[in-house]
Image (cartoon, rainbow, N blue to C red):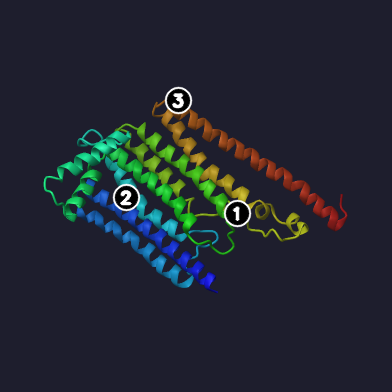
Amino acid sequence: MQKTSVLDMFKFVCAVVTRAFFILVSLTGIWKVTWVKGDPYYWLLTFLLLPLVVEMIITLKRRKGKDYKWFSPPIFLFLICIIPSIWILELHHQQNKDSDPQCKKLNSLENVRKLITIQHNNNNTRENGTHQDYLRIFNNVFTSVCSDDWILGLHQVVLILVILGKWLLPLGGGVTRDELSQLLLIFVGTAADILEFTTETLSDIQETHLRLVYIILGVWTWSMLQFPLHLAVVNSKSDSQPMEEVQTMSLLTRYSTDLWSIMEAFFIQDGPFLVVRLTVMIYYKVFHQMLVFFAIKNFLVVILNLYRLSVICHDSRPSRSRAVDVDGDVL
């Protein structure tokens, strides 16, 4: 009994800590937007945090912090909170590349060390530093970093936090540890593809091609919405069902996870990524090795998923005919 109470307390703490990190990162993004734009009205973006807070209260009270089987509301609401901030930062950076002030690049450990040391020395003119001095150091360090490094760091933190958040959130009803481990591995690969697509493709865009920036950010937003969904690994059928019942199931029911993975590749990730990269190469005349390589990679994923779909459809026909033969002796 005591072990159960300790486990419930641990799950409760994990649920609270995960949502607290979601809120902290969202507030950091909003602070950066307010500082970049120089307009305090952007603090109104904090109202986007209210649904996440309400969801946390309801989930902790009614479900003791447990997530749902097919869908993760906290991850979805976290994306709603952080995506507008990233949109604003990306658009501002694309429109003001040449007018950006002098900044510090974070492309080496030495540069990072120099940045922190300089800011610390500047505030050490007095012997005893107050908490305001340390806050000033913190603010100067973050505001001195280049916009592209800042935005890249925000992209990276969001993707890592989504993966760790899903790992820490208590399992929903019907989700096994095996399915969770598969889902986390899928998330890691998906996050790497999304980060590469956003950073590499946006770096190829010139200031005059702002329309393409909107398209890339739209595709990025669409691809991020697959993280709250668990359909790629959570089975709709139970392993304890007899083989006869499994064979008589419909194609959609038997191969639900495979079909969802294929649809994700076609319509959410590799398909849209391929279209954008081909547009960049053909219409906007941007061409380099990495762009071609990742376009070929997206094309291969789409083709292989088409092949997988054909295999599933082909394998389902013999099973149906065998089921009819057993039940009705029809050859």
Proximity of marks 1 and 2: CB atoms separated by less than 8 Å = no
The residue shown at (51%, 54%) is 229
Mark 3, residue position: 289
Q: Residue at x 54, y 51 (%)?
A: 183
Residue 322 relative to residue 218: left or right: right
- Expressed as whole percent of the image width and height from the top left, the position of residue 262 reads 59, 45
Of the image marks 3 and 1, the number of the one nearer the N terminus: 1
Task: Tell which circle, 1 or 2, labels the residue nearer the N-terminal end.
Answer: 2
- Foreground residue among 283 and 213: 213
For disc 2, the marked residue is 85
* First in residue order: circle 3 vs circle 2: 2
Residue 106 x/y as whole percent? 30, 36
Numbered label attached to residue 178: 1
Q: Judge depth for marks 3 and 1 and give the one in front.
A: 1
Question: Which element type, helix, strand or loop, lies under badge 1?
Answer: helix
Callouts 3 and 1 close, C-beta under 8 Å: no
* CA distance separating discs 3 and 2: 31 Å
88 vs 103: above or below:
below
Check disc 1: other Cα within 10 Å, few if <14, some if 14-19, many if 20+. few
At x 53% / y 46%, what residue is drawn?
186
- Left or right of 253? Residue 107 is left
Category of crowding for the residue at label 3, using alpha-carbon neighbours closer than 10 angstroms: few (below 14), some (14–19), many (at least 20): few
Q: Residue furthest bottom?
A: 1
Residue at horizontal 50 percent and vertical 72 percent from the top: 5
As measured in the structure, the alpha-carbon distance from the residue carrying label 3 to the one carrying label 1 is 38 Å
Residue type of the residue flagged with mark 2: Ser
**71 in relation to 120, above or below:** below
**Gap in angstroms between the C-alphas marked 1 and 2:** 35 Å
Q: Residues within 10 Å of mark 2 (few under 14, many from 20)?
A: many
- Amino acid bearing label 1: Asp
Tell whether 5 sits left or right of 155.
Answer: right
Task: Indicate the quadrant where residue 238 lies.
Answer: bottom right
